[in-house]
Amino acid sequence: MKLEQLLAGIDGSNTSGDIGDEISTVCYSAEKCREGSVFVAIPGLKHDGHDFIPEAIARGAKYIVHEKDLQFPREVTAIKVANSRRALGILAKNYFGNPSANLVLIAVVGTNGKTTITYLLESILKAAGNKCGVLGTVNYRFNDKTYPAPNTTPESYELQKILREMADAGVTHVIAEVSSHAIDLKRVDDCDFDMGIFTNLTRDHLDYHKTMENYFQAKKRFFSEVLPQSRKNNHQKMVINNDDRWGQRILAETQLPALAYCIENNCDLKATDYDLSLLGITARINISGETLSISSPLIGKFNLYNILAAVGASFILHIPQSSIKAGIEQLSCVPGRLESVETNSGFHVFVDYAHTDDALRRVLQNLSVLKKKRIITVFGCGGDRDRGKRPLMGEAAVSYSDLAIVTSDNPRLEDPGAIIREIETGIDQKKIKKVEIDSPQIMNETHSYTVIPDRKKAIEAAIHFASVGDIVLIAGKGHEDYQIMGTKKMPFDDRIVAANALKRKVK
């Protein structure tokens, strides 16, 4: 591809040098450059790509896209742009031939529920005979192959690259979890989306966004700026949760045609006559004068909302009701989302990704309605992340648990003990009794908590304390198969630790 073709669509660029040359690759990491590469210097959150321009040139890059005033060797073609991160998206789209134009591309936006909705839609679309790709928190996958997911939403270059691979492999539909970071950093601006789903908004990522309003504006930007510029001509482009106050704002503050879903309010797509149990969900779903009866092995009211979102998107895509029903019923679980760990001990063990106070509260509220005896909750908070949610997590956990075990999550560079102490500030010590792990009272106390900093020991203790009729919830890490201690990723999977503890309990 010639540089001139690659630069198409980048407004206001100032180029010094020949733009008729052939380029070899596009890269934004200097170490990936080779002879004839275009290097895009991006100011990042931790490092500035402009500092690596000499290395990129030394490795053979002949074309440098930058946004700062710099001097370059004569043999280098410099392309100055207003925003190099924004330019990377356009360059990637051009380099990979705008793959989203030939795909049905669906975005799932919101704090909670994104992963489950992608799994539901994938199951429904496959039941209808479509070939699906998914980009999400758990992994990236298509054609029965899975790839690690370094980010929920890839950087714009990797996003266009994997969309190209999917299109070339015959994929027809792609469902992507789109994070607030990705929207704010303009990773998805150069994709032609067919539809966007909004789930809800609760406190998260305030270490980055600072305020809930900023966080909301980042989410809303997808529906007010990114989606409207798509060249796809769908009748309805938005599926919005009308029971969420932030979803109501999106409906009020954006102009695109929308399908609203709800349980509590009145809207286009509504669940009625629903039943929730530890065996799953049954419900009648009313939409546009039609009624769909569904049964799902997923648990909890929040998963009924996720089902409604997937049904709404499927109706817009004209998926037959039989395929919608089959897809919902065939999805038995979602990795790390209230995922059951098999046990024959007479109590239930669930692993869930709930890592915000609202997500933890919702999961526990749903389980508290279904419990027969006690709820024992294991949870912690990640290090080097929003510290303000730590006391909120503590308050949420003890409000609905008979016994809460405070432990480590991914402490990263922080002291696990310091994180736990901040969690404890949210626990009302006058109402919730702190008990020692070796106290004989711990088996009988209700509304109590204890501290076990070692996560493996905390999970083992929860299993040890559980008896017939109890529910054990292990929250915070879900599908993750690692624990980040310092700068190292150590192998650790809540599900495996719990399964091993259950085996020892049986013996």
Image (cartoon, rainbow, N blue to C red):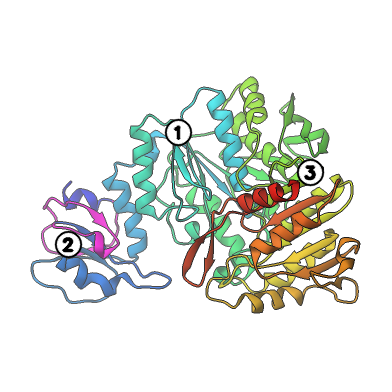
- Badge 2 density bin: few <14, some 14–19, many ≥20, Cα 10 Å: many
Residue type at tag 2: Ala
Element type where label 3 sits in the image: loop
When the figure is inspected, residue 451 is found, relative to residue 353, above or below; the finding is below
Dot 1 corresponds to which residue? 144
Q: Position of residue 233 (x, y in %)?
A: 48, 35
Q: Position of residue 118 (x, y in %)?
A: 57, 41
- Residue 430: which quarter of the image? bottom right
Q: Which residues are magenta?
A: 9-35
Residue type at tag 1: Asp
1 vs 2, front mark: 1
Dot 2 corresponds to which residue? 61
Residue at the location (85% across, 70% down)? 439
Residue type at tag 3: Ser
Q: Is residue 209 left or right of residue 98?
A: right
Dominant secondary structure of the residues highlighted in magenta in the image: loop
| N-term mark: 1 or 2 | 2
Q: Is residue 65 left or right of residue 46?
A: left
Dot 3 corresponds to which residue? 345
